[in-house]
Amino acid sequence: MKKSTIWILTVVMAIAVLGLLFVQIMYMENMIKMRNEQFSEVVMRSLYNVASNLERDETEHFLDQDLNEAQKSFAPLSSSKIVDNDFASSGIDTTGSNLSIDKKTSKSTNLGPRLNTGMSRQEILKSQYLYQKSLLNEVILNILNHASDRPINERADSATVGEYIRQELQNNGLEMPFEYAVQYPSRSFAYSTEGFEQSAEDKGTYPQILFPNDPNGNYCTLSVTFPTKSDYIFSSIKFMLPSFAFTFLLMAVFIYTIILAFRQKKLSEIKNDFINNMTHEFKTPISSISLAAQMLNDPAVAKSPVMLKQAATVINDETKRLRFQVEKVLQMSMFDRTSATMKLQEVDADAVIYSVVNTFKLKVEKFGGTITADLRSDDPIVNVDEMHFTNVIFNLLDNAIKYRRDDVSPQLTVSSFNPDDDHITITVEDNGIGMKREDLKKIFEKFYRVSTGNRHDVKGFGLGLAYVHKMITLFNGNIKAESEVGKGSKFIITLPLLK
């Protein structure tokens, strides 16, 4: 799959997932907004009913008060009835169409306007209606003139207000705890419940003016707040939590899939590069061996011991080179099973290093360079696999030659010393082309190769340093690299001593 195709799929899937997430978020916001509006509407309707109930109580209070006063004033004349069946005792004849009333009785009982004898029943009832209406008007005027003079604690008792709020909320289908307070126009509290102030700071309040018909305009305000409002709103949208969870899971799977796709693409490119490098590395020694074999078939070469020896040397050297390349390829397959095939034993590290340096000396001298062994360790005995330990030193020296500078002769130094009583430190230092700081972080990764242009002598598989790191780790040691571009590199290996 092309990288452009992967990017297109990534963009399309990202837009789809983000679009889905956006729609869910917008839906949730609209749900919360709608629930808040419904909640506010129910609360304000309930508080309006509470205020109406308090006004009705106010009216009933003054009606009771006026009735009580009227009863006291009528007590001496309680024997005088104003009902229809007692009109006869008041001088009114109810048996015919003409009704009469005793003026003296009418005046003494103050039943309204004086009724003249001969008034119809309809006129008498009309007079009674007008009188009762005048009484109601007096009550209304009394409310308008004197109601606002009463203390708010009497007009809207705390217990009564709380009960009204609870009843109205229940009638509107809202049963939840609340806190409330009544405030004067100056915003000071007439009274409040214990948790009102803290709840108001966190959740907000719903205000309702009490007795808005008071003539002086000094209205008290009933404020109500709900400590568990957030929980109530959240309970209506919690069904969306699973959808968000699945969306985020889908997003995580999508991201992981994209990472795997790019990783596989990178591995595919590495594999192609590996095959190209391997083909090139194998082609050179095979060509040399083929050329030497053709020389051996030449009768003239067969008659010349010098040329015969030269051809044999070429075949031997190139065969070793080919075997070494094959061994490096096989090292890749050993990464996951090396621990099972390792043969750890007591090994003299200085002796192995000295042997490798002597073997490698001819190759260094071929390029006009020198290699020096500075072995100063007092205790060089380590517990390693001798073959793999030898390959580690050989790989580091081979890299030093491959990444040499063209303007100076290669100078290689291998040293060892004991930093403490429990470890040995081995360093391989060169004066080659060096590495950048960003390359130092990746050089021990499998298949990673530092870019050096298209030079033939630095072609490789990107396995050498990865193999070195793997082996040193299995030997319970560690390795690090120090390098500077144009000045060379230094690899430092630390291994535990055999005790």
Image (spheres, helix red, strand yellow):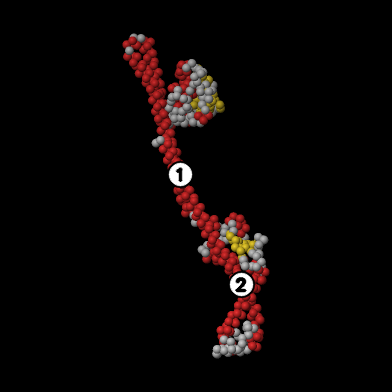
498 to 150, vertically: above or below: above
Q: How many marks?
A: 2
Q: Amino acid at mark 1?
A: Ile
Residue 16 visible to an observer of this rendering: yes
263 to 110, vertically: above or below: above
Neighbour class for label 1 at 10 Å: few (<14), some, many (≥20)?
Answer: few
196 to 268, vertically: above or below: below
Neighbour class for label 2 at 10 Å: few (<14), some, many (≥20)?
Answer: some
At x 46% / y 16%, what residue is drawn?
A: 366
Q: Amino acid at mark 2?
A: Thr
* Residue 241 screen position, x and y as percent: 48, 51
Q: Earlier in the sequence, mark 1 or mark 2?
A: 1
| Disc on res. 59 | 2
At x 65% / y 88%, what residue is drawn?
A: 104
Assign a secondary structure to mark 1: helix
At x 51% / y 55%, what residue is drawn?
A: 32
* Residue 448 screen position, x and y as percent: 46, 30
Q: Nearer the viewer, residue 489 or 251?
A: 251
Instruction: Please name the residue that numbered disc 1 is placed on.
Output: 15
Assign a secondary structure to mark 2: helix
* Residue 19 screen position, x and y as percent: 46, 47
Residue 471 visible to an observer of this rendering: no
